Amino acid sequence: MKLTNFGFSENEEKVYMACLELGMAPISVIAKKANLKRTTVYEVIKKLAKKGVSEYFLKNNVRFYSVISPNKLYNKLKANLRNFQEELPRLNAIHNEIAYKPKVRFYEGREDILRVYLEVINNNQEKEFRNYFMPEQTLDYLGYDWVMKNFIDTDNFRAIKVRTIAPHTSKDLSEINTYKNREMRVIKDPNVSFKNEVYIYDNKVATFSFDEDFAFVIESKKVADTEKAIFDLAWESAGLL
C-alpha cells in the first residue's frame, strides 16, 4: 500500500507500516523498525495523531503508540473524499471567479508582436473581429509579404468576418478591400485620427503600437463589449471605401 498516494509523506508511511506490524510500541522501537531517528518518529507520530491515524496509552509512565487499522483508515479517507466532493461546487465557484478576472498581457519586440498579431485569426472563437487599421504603419512594420502570406491569404482569415475602419490619411485601400469576408470604411473627418492598430474579438482587445515596438492585450468581456459598441458607433459614421 502506498500511502504517499493519499496525502501521506514518506516518513508517515514508514511509521504507519512499522506501527501496523508492531501493534503497540514505544518510540524507540518504532524508530528502529522504521529505520528513522527517534526525534523524527516523534514528530511524525504527532502529525499522524492530528490526522486521527495514531493513538497511544501509558504503561509504567511509558507511551506506547499504535495506528488505526487499514479498514478504519480506508473509511477515514473515504469520508474525507466525500467531504471534499461536498465542497466542490463552492471551490469551483471560487476558481471560476479567479479564472474570469480581467487579464492584461504586455508584449515588446518584433517576435512577440508577430505572434500576438496571428492570435487574432488563429485563436478567434467568434470568427469575427473589428479592426482599426493603420495600413502604412502595419505594412511597414510587419512587411507586405509577411502580412499576405501569414495573415490575409490564410484559411483562418477567410473564415472570419472582418470589419475594418481606416483613417482618412491612408493611401488607396482598394487592393486591400477585395476579400468577400471583409468590409472596410474610412474616417473622412480630417479632425479625427488614431495612431494605433486595434483588434477587437471574442473577449479581447489587442492594441499594437508599431512605432513604439510594443503591443498589449486586454482580456475582459466588459472591456471588449464596450469597445465593440464604440466601434459600431464609429462604423455607422464612417464613410464607404
Image (cartoon, rainbow, N blue to C red):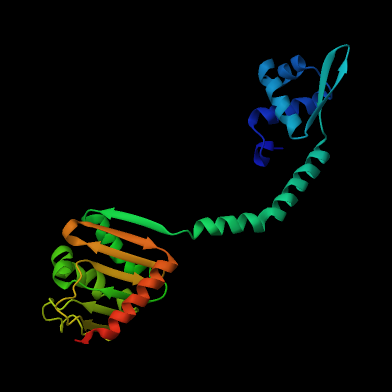
Picture mark count:
0
- Whether residue 129 is visible to the viewer of this picture, yes or no, is no
Write the residue at 24% across / 75% down. 152
Indicate the quadrant containing the C terminus: top left, top right, bottom left or bottom right.
bottom left
- Determine the image quadrant of residue 95: bottom right
- Does residue 200 appear left or right of residue 138 in this picture? right
Q: Where's residue 107, x and y in %?
A: 28, 54
Q: Is residue 228 above or below residue 20?
A: below
Choose between 178 and 155: the one closer to the eye.
178
Q: Where's residue 187, x and y in %?
A: 20, 80
Q: Residue furthest right?
A: 60
Choose between 147 and 204: the one closer to the eye.
204
- Whether residue 157 is visible to the viewer of this picture, yes or no, is yes
Write the residue at 28% across / 80% down. 234
Q: Residue furthest left?
A: 171
Q: Residue furthest front?
A: 191
Choose between 12 and 95: the one closer to the eye.
95
- Determine the image quadrant of residue 71: top right
Q: Where's residue 204, x and y in %?
A: 38, 66
Write the residue at 79% across / 39% down. 73
- Does residue 51 appear left or right of residue 10 in this picture? right
Write the residue at 35% across / 68% down. 122
Q: Is residue 222 above or below residue 238?
A: above
Q: Is residue 148 above or below residue 113?
A: below
Q: Where's residue 157, x and y in %?
A: 30, 75
